Image (cartoon, rainbow, N blue to C red):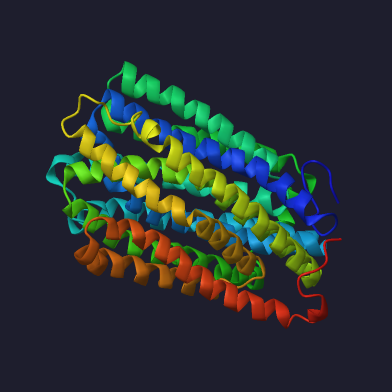
């Protein structure tokens, strides 16, 4: 079944399928990260280093909110993808309706929680006084847009579950261009400061959500009739059982990040600004990894629907090879172009600009050494999630948290501030070893182990 609006990944060559599916996602994620990149660039150049530092101070609190939303909606997509692979269209419609109900409930809960806890969270993270007020303004606006974030994520997840990565790409292109236009209007023309950047992000997601919802309504198998608007408890529970641990996984990951953020905040304003600028490039170069992850998740879920573990193994090997090649290219960008890119965020006239740039370059140099580990982490973790297991990936996130916290609290006492940088790489390495061990034995015992790493047809 392949119509341009859906894609059956249970037939065909895995490398071609994964690349064809992941490339639009990669471009979409690139556009998504591009508008956060542009936010930082415009804020740094037109508002100042204090506003750039405020964006940096908000990063993990932004991740903990939107990472949970992404995890929950991605869990819903695993169930939908499996029904699509099994050609159970009635169950697929119930899964889509159930996902929408979960998103609506989550939007209310998360909006209230975000507005209630944001100030206290910033204080616990020892956010510098120079940027505390700016960071709170930025986060309150973003958290106010949580319903829009849920709407976009569930709609894009449904499209990806059906093998359609073109529509989410177009949605993010629209959002990215819209965000840039809003930034220019609100920050540069109307001088609204960091609040203008936040409003630009929210309004850009409105555009992306509208496009995805319109696209879903055009797909016949997604049209929910009156008789389909019932909650199937078994399907809903399965979506919750997969989605909630995936969301918790991101909370666990963020917990380690929050400790790191508190440590970084304690190193002072200059260190925080350089670290924040480097993170903007890091997140941009990470986008391909998350795209390959979404690709192998959908591929695995559809093929598990048919019980084809042989194809899952072939797809996994293909994804790992693609991932390492891409990661090495990203590492080269960090090493050879990193300082020039950081200079786009930090004005040379800022006091302490040299120290800020030095911090950012040191951070990028450490990340570059371990970037293949990050790409493999996305791929292996999402393969396990695509098989319907969200507990093991959650445990791997706990391992990352422990490693980040240990490095932030203790390694920094031995080697200085760079202990925070190495915490990222060591966290990736520990999670990779754990997940690879589990996945190897799980696939080895899947019934056709005599062809363990073969089979691409």
Q: Name the outermost residue toward the top.
A: 189
Residue 110 falls left or right of residue 275: right
Q: Nearer the viewer, residue 122 or 91?
A: 122
Q: Name the outermost residue toward the left.
A: 129
The image quadrant that residue 52 belongs to is top left
The image quadrant that residue 210 belongs to is top right
Against 67, residue 392 (above or below) is below
Q: Residue at the location (47% across, 74% down)?
A: 395
Residue 219 in percent (x, y) is at: 76, 43
Residue 89 falls left or right of residue 111: right
Against 155, residue 453 (above or below) is below
Q: Residue at the location (67% across, 64% down)?
A: 79
Examine the rendering and report whether any part of residue 144 can be seen.
no
Number of dots carrying numbers: 0
The image quadrant that residue 44 belongs to is top left
Residue 134 in percent (x, y) is at: 22, 38
Q: Residue at the location (85% across, 54% down)?
A: 12
Quadrant containing the C terminus in the rendered view? bottom right
Residue 390 in percent (x, y) is at: 56, 71
Residue 226 falls left or right of residue 403: right
Q: Nearer the viewer, residue 436 or 36?
A: 436
Residue 184 in percent (x, y) is at: 39, 21
Against 380, residue 28 (above or below) is above
Q: Nearer the viewer, residue 170 or 334?
A: 334
Q: Nearer the viewer, residue 120 or 353?
A: 353
Examine the rendering and report whether any part of residue 163 can be seen.
yes
């Amino acid at each position: 079944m392949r119509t341009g609006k859906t894609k059956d990944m249970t037939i065909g060559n895995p490398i071609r399928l994964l690349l064809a599916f992941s490339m639009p996602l990669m471009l979409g994620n690139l556009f998504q990260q591009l508008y956060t990149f542009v936010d930082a660039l415009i804020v740094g150049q037109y508002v100042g280093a204090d506003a750039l530092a405020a964006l940096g101070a908000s990063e993990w609190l932004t991740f903990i909110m939107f990472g949970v939303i992404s995890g929950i909606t991605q869990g819903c997509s695993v169930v939908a993808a499996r029904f699509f692979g099994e050609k159970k269209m009635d169950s697929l419609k119930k899964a889509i309706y159930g996902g929408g109900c979960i998103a609506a409930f989550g939007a209310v809960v998360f909006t209230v929680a975000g507005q209630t806890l944001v100030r206290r969270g910033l204080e616990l993270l020892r956010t510098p006084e120079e940027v505390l007020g700016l960071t709170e303004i930025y986060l309150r606006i973003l958290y106010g847009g949580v319903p829009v974030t849920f709407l976009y994520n569930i709609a894009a997840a449904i499209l990806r579950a059906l093998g359609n990565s073109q529509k989410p790409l177009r949605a993010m292109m629209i959002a990215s261009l819209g965000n840039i236009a809003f930034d220019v209007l609100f920050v540069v023309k109307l001088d609204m400061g960091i609040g203008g950047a936040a409003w630009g992000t929210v309004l850009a997601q409105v555009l992306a959500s509208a496009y995805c919802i319109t696209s879903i309504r055009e797909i016949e198998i997604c049209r929910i009739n009156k008789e389909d608007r019932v909650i199937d408890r078994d399907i809903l529970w399965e979506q919750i059982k997969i989605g909630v641990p995936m969301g918790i996984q991101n909370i666990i990951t963020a917990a380690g990040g929050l400790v790191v953020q508190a440590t970084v905040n304690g190193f002072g304003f200059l260190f925080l600004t350089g670290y924040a600028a480097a993170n903007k490039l890091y997140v941009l170069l990470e986008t391909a990894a998350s795209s390959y992850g979404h690709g192998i998740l959908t591929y695995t879920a559809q093929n598990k629907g048919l019980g084809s573990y042989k194809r899952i193994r072939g797809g996994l090997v293909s994804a790992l090879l693609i991932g390492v090649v891409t990661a090495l290219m990203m590492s080269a960008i960090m090493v050879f172009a990193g300082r020039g890119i950081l200079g786009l965020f930090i004005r040379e006239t800022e006091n302490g600009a040299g120290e800020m740039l030095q911090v950012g370059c040191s951070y990028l140099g450490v990340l570059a050494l371990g970037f293949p580990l990050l790409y493999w982490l996305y791929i292996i973790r999402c393969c396990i999630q695509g098989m319907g297991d969200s507990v093991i990936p959650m445990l791997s996130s706990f391992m990352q948290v422990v490693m980040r916290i240990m490095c932030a609290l203790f390694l920094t006492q031995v080697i200085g501030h760079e202990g925070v940088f190495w915490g990222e790489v060591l966290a990736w390495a520990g999670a990779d070893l754990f997940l690879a061990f589990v996945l190897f034995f799980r696939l080895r015992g899947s019934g056709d182990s005599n062809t363990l790493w073969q089979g691409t047809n």
